[in-house]
Image: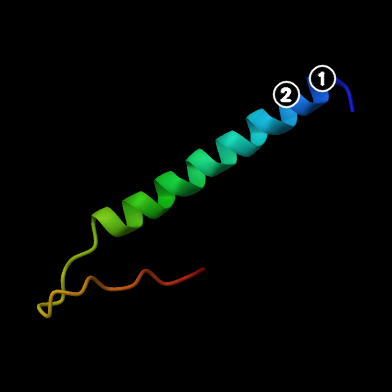
Amino acid sequence: MSEADIASALAVGAAACVAFGDVVHQRTAHAVPTGNGVAPTPKAT
């Protein structure tokens, strides 16, 4: 692999991590407590 290929792979990987982390954060940050102090677990799709 050339340096450009490696750089592209790293950029794509980083973007995927950021996107996944953002989705997880949004799903957990807006979870509504059920009254027992435990937030509902987001359903895995």
Task: Give the labeled residue for mark 2.
Answer: 7
Q: Name the residue rendered at 30%, 58% in the picture.
A: 28
Q: Name the residue rendered at 18%, 66% in the picture.
A: 32
Question: Looking at numbered disc 2 in the image, what kind of residue is underneath it?
Answer: Ala
Position of the N terminus by quadrant: top right
| Residue furthest out toward the left | 35
Q: Secondary structure at mark 1?
A: helix
Task: Give the labeled residue for mark 1.
Answer: 3
Tell me: residue 40, above or below residue 21: below
Question: Looking at numbered disc 1 in the image, what kind of residue is underneath it?
Answer: Glu
Tell me: residue 12, above or below residue 41: above
Residue 25 placement (x, y as % from top left): 35, 50
Residue 39 placement (x, y as % from top left): 23, 70
User: In this view of the protein, which residue sits in the foreground, 15 or 2?
Assistant: 2
Q: Secondary structure at mark 2?
A: helix
User: In this view of the protein, which residue sits in the foreground, 30 or 13?
Assistant: 13
| Residue furthest out toward the right | 1
The crowding category of the residue bearing disc 1, from other C-alpha atoms within 10 Å (few below 14, some 14 to 19, many at least 20), is few
CB under 8 Å between callouts 1 and 2?
yes
Residue 26 placement (x, y as % from top left): 33, 50
Picture quarter containing residue 43? Answer: bottom left
Q: CA distance from mark 1 to mark 2?
A: 6 Å
Tell me: residue 27, above or below residue 4: below
Residue 17 placement (x, y as % from top left): 54, 43
Q: Name the residue rendered at 49%, 42% in the picture.
A: 19
